[in-house]
Structures are given as structure tokens and as C-alpha cells.
């Protein structure tokens, strides 16, 4: 599967190379001490804050979900080009950009996110917020859990 070929690195925010944006005059507007990430071809690097505080966990998980959304859409739609609906750091509304990049940022701007909860004990749950891309990925293949029948070759 395509996602099995990806490398995902989780690093501390203090390990970020601030020279990454050195050619962009707006780089001084960025705060590299807060959790953030970079998704490229076949690789995600997220920079998080190692802290047990629940708000920090929420912030870290939001960044991880954001970058995973880029990855998932890149797997599904690697070459699709769209016009951005909203301005962001990398461009302005109306600019052409890869769908897997633009769509995630546009959905964040439109507050198209959803909460995810997971249990940490019988009585307690943690919550994090991620970009909602369910409508883009759950309809690609109707039968996502099927398998090829060994005799007929049909998808079951």
C-alpha cells in the first residue's frame, strides 16, 4: 500500500531548521517554537512540543492530523491541480496549486475540522481536532475491506 512507503518523523520544535524558509521574506512572521509540520513527497516531518499538558497534546495532535491529511490526499490525488479558495502562507485565493496541499489549508480556513476522541482509561478520554477529509476518501472505493477471491478473481 502507498502509505506503507512513507516516512514519518516526529521531532521536537527546537530541532527545526529555520533556514527552511530562508528565501521567503515572510519567514520572520513564523514562530517555529509552536508545533508545525512539513509534508513532502513520501515524507512527513512534524515538530511538536514534548509536554504532558492537555492543551499542548491537542496542539501537537492537530499538527499531526494536518500533515497526515496532506499525505492521504497526496496518495489519493497526487497530480490534481485546483485553484485555492483562501489565502495562506504559500499563495492567494485563485492561485493554482496541488489539491493535496490547497484542500487541507482551505478546509482549515473554512473550519472544516472534526474532533476525535480516544480513551486513555475506562473513565477518561483525550480529544484532538483534525481536518475533516472523510468525504474525499471514503467514496473513492466502495469496498475498502474487500479481497480478491482466489478462484474467480473478483473483488468480494
Image (cartoon, rainbow, N blue to C red):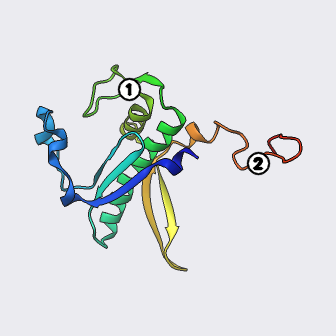
In percent of width and height, residue 7 lies at 42, 52
Residue at the disc numbered 1: 85
Q: Distance between the residues labelled 1 and 2?
A: 38 Å
Give above or below for 34 relative to 87.
below
> Label 1's element?
loop
What crowding class fits label 2: few (fewer than 14 Cα within 10 Å), some (14-19), or many (20 or more)? few
Residue drawn at x 18%, y 39% as measured from the top left: 21
**Camera-side residue of 61 and 141:** 141
Please give the label number shown on residue 147: 2
What crowding class fits label 1: few (fewer than 14 Cα within 10 Å), some (14-19), or many (20 or more)? some
Give the side of residue 106 with respect to residue 78, left or right. left
> Which quadrant of the rendered structure holds the C terminus?
top right
Q: Which tag, 1 or 2, sits closer to the chain's start?
A: 1
Residue drawn at x 51%, y 42% as measured from the top left: 133
In percent of width and height, residue 2 lies at 54, 44
Residue drawn at x 38%, y 26% as measured from the top left: 85
Give the side of residue 116 with respect to residue 14, left or right. right
Give above or below for 120 relative to 40.
below
Give the side of residue 140 with respect to residue 126, left or right. right
Rendered image quadrant of residue 33: bottom left
The single residue placed furthest to the front in the displayed view is: 151
**Camera-side residue of 52 and 67:** 67
Rendered image quadrant of residue 136: top right
Amino acid at each position: 500500500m502507498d502509505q506503507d512507503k512513507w516516512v514519518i518523523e516526529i521531532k521536537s520544535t527546537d530541532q527545526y531548521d529555520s533556514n527552511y524558509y530562508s528565501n521567503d521574506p515572510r519567514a520572520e512572521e513564523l514562530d517555529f517554537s509552536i508545533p508545525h509540520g512539513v509534508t513532502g513527497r513520501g515524507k512527513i516531518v512534524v515538530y511538536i512540543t514534548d509536554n504532558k499538558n492537555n492543551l499542548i497534546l491537542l496542539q501537537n495532535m492537530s499538527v499531526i492530523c494536518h500533515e497526515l491529511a496532506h499525505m492521504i490526499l497526496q496518495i489519493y490525488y497526487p497530480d490534481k491541480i485546483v485553484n485555492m479558495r483562501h489565502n495562506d502562507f504559500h499563495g492567494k485565493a485563485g492561485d493554482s496549486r496541488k489539491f493535496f496541499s490547497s484542500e487541507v489549508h482551505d478546509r482549515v480556513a473554512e473550519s472544516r475540522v472534526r474532533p476525535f476522541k480516544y480513551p486513555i482509561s475506562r473513565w477518561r478520554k483525550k480529544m484532538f481536532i483534525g481536518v475533516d477529509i472523510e468525504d474525499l476518501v471514503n467514496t473513492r472505493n466502495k469496498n475498502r475491506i474487500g479481497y480478491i477471491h482466489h478462484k474467480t478473481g473478483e473483488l468480494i
